[in-house]
Image (spheres, rainbow, N blue to C red):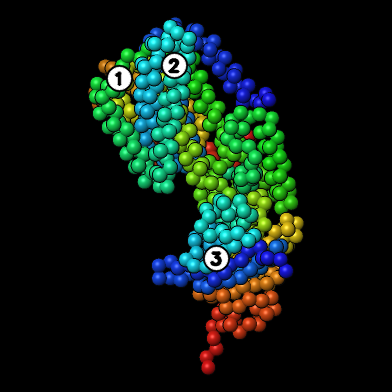
Amino acid sequence: MNAPLLKLDNVTVQFGGLKAVGDLSFTIGEGELIGLIGPNGAGKTTVFNLITGVYEPTAGAITFANKSVVGHRPYKITARGIARTFQNIRLFPSLSVFDNVRTACNMHLRHGISHALARGPKFSAEEREIEATVMELLEIFSLTAERDAACKSLPYGDQRRLEIVRALATRPKLLLLDEPAAGMNPTEKAELMKLIRFTQEKFGCAVLLVEHDMKVVMGICQRINVLDYGRKIAEGTPTEIRNDPKVIAAYLGKEEE
Amino acid sequence: MFERSKILLVATLLTFAGLSHFAGGISPYYFDILIGIGINIILAVGLNLVNGYTGQFSLGHAGFMAVGAYASSWLTLKYGYSMGSGTLNTTTVFVLALLGGGLGAALAGLIVGVPSLRLKGDYLAIVTLGVNEISKGVLQKAEPLGAQRGLGGMEQHTNFFWTFAFAAITIYVVLNLVGSTYGRGFLAVRDDEIAAEAMGINTTKYKVLAFVLAAFFAGIAGGLYAHFKQFIHPEGFNFLRSVDIVVMVILGGMGNTAGVVVAATLLTILPEFLRAVSRYEWLPEWLRHVAENRMILYSLLLIVLMLTRPQGLFGNFTGKRNSKLQ
């Protein structure tokens, strides 16, 4: 087996006296779809923030494609190929659907400020190229009709979808999805599951999925890591996890002896 | 090659060059107001890049204007006369001095911006306000630059053409920058810094860039001002001058260049209009006093605006407009 794409090695992060994540290790291989679950406050979003450079681990190592990401600014980590969505949607509210995705193409620009001001043929060619890329992505996720709409006016499910599109526009090797099914109705959830699997296949990127909805997680993940109080209590296939007594105890509590 | 905005810029510059020939016929009073409008447009449109498009609150724009005014005046006073009869004509020296003043202000913007742009909102406003006061304080003590006596003796090089040419260039730069994919980074920083970083945007770079560009244009405006009035004084670049510019940006609508141009024009004319009003003897005494104190009206204007149109007179943050701005 090749070296994993992402590797967390005994990662610990401490906020004052609170150990939010302790000695966490797991790996994600190229193109894998991995779930990360756990009760509320287990530290799932903190793990995302550690991987994307929002927080720095107190101890341990995080390597992406064989290079450490610890201590790098988030934008640099995104440039290396990790993109994310947010638990509470963070689109750019004043920008249109098109511009939200266009902004994510910013880091791949070959021409900088001087070209934006001189407006030469190279600039126009690149802007047209970006427009084509954005429109292609919007087409795939059937958001073409909403191109010029204010992103805030979209229905909730579409906003979540747009966040995924925007993350994909950075051309990631690893996509982190933070509770994409939150607030969705069953039909939307079913759509989302199809969408995530489709994304993984079409764009060939690995996916790390944080999700509360067990149906979604169990339905699409190849492997699942379970967190409780910042520690990993189980890892395995959906079937293994479903029958793991420690996982059941973490979610439902222990039976009285 | 012949992109629309470029053609528009060249056409505008040619028009101004043509109009410049007729500007001599305007009475000095109206000419003064006209040049004031041009200078304020440069200041406000530049500041709008920071306060409007990038969402940072700078409250010290007059400080950068001062740097540009003093730097360019020092350059023309030192080199202007000696070279005037030589190889370079005085206009060339003047334009080079303007650019020098702009670069000086941009450098000041870089030095101030790198450490202070870690701060947000009110805190950034306070720091920039402090920098404004410090630059004023330094100028008041700088003996070679006239200190408290002010600096004079510059020739009047600023004319209709140069003022409005630079105003047009400022508008061109800001609009083309913000409309490009590159410039969408400014708006992303304003809308959500965390999301912007997650999308691969170096938020620090964009904030500093906006700050430096705005400072550059403020420096140019300062140079134009100095070579129009032919006399500058540290008090002319105080906190109230900075507030004037911020009011133009807020009134015009943060992140709306057309609105800011209109607001800069209106707010340059307004004090003159009020001065005229305060002389109407048939008006009640108290109204004439209010008219004399424009700051009272400014604050009332801002309060009414905040309550009724928080997005500014012309502000309109819908996505549709933005995406058409390419």
Which residue in the protein does label 3 denote?
A61
User: Residue B199 at x, y = what percent?
Assistant: 59, 50
Label 1–label 3 contact, CB within 8 A: no
B42 or B313: which is nearer to us? B42
The residue depicted at 66 percent of the width and 33 percent of the height is A123
For the residues labelled 2 and 1, the Cα–Cα distance comes to 17 Å
Q: Amino acid at mark 2?
A: Phe
Considering the image in quadrants, where does the N terminus of chain A appear? bottom right
**Furthest residue in direction bottom, as rendered:** A257
The residue depicted at 37 percent of the width and 41 percent of the height is B125
For the residues labelled 1 and 3, the Cα–Cα distance comes to 60 Å
Which residue in the protein does label 2 denote?
B94
Q: Amino acid at mark 3?
A: Ala
The answer as to whether the residues below labels 2 and 3 share one chain is: no
Q: Chain of mark 1?
A: B
In terms of image quadrants, where is residue A27? bottom right
Which residue in the protein does label 1 denote?
B151
The residue depicted at 49 percent of the width and 45 percent of the height is B204
* Picture disc at residue A178: none
User: Residue A225 at x, y = what percent?
Assistant: 62, 73
In terms of image quadrants, where is residue A213? bottom right
Count residues near mark 2 (Cα–Cα under 10 Å), then give few for <14, some for 14-19, many for 20+: many
Horizontal side of residue B93 vs A171, given as left or right? left
Q: Of helix, strand and loop, which one carries label 2?
A: helix
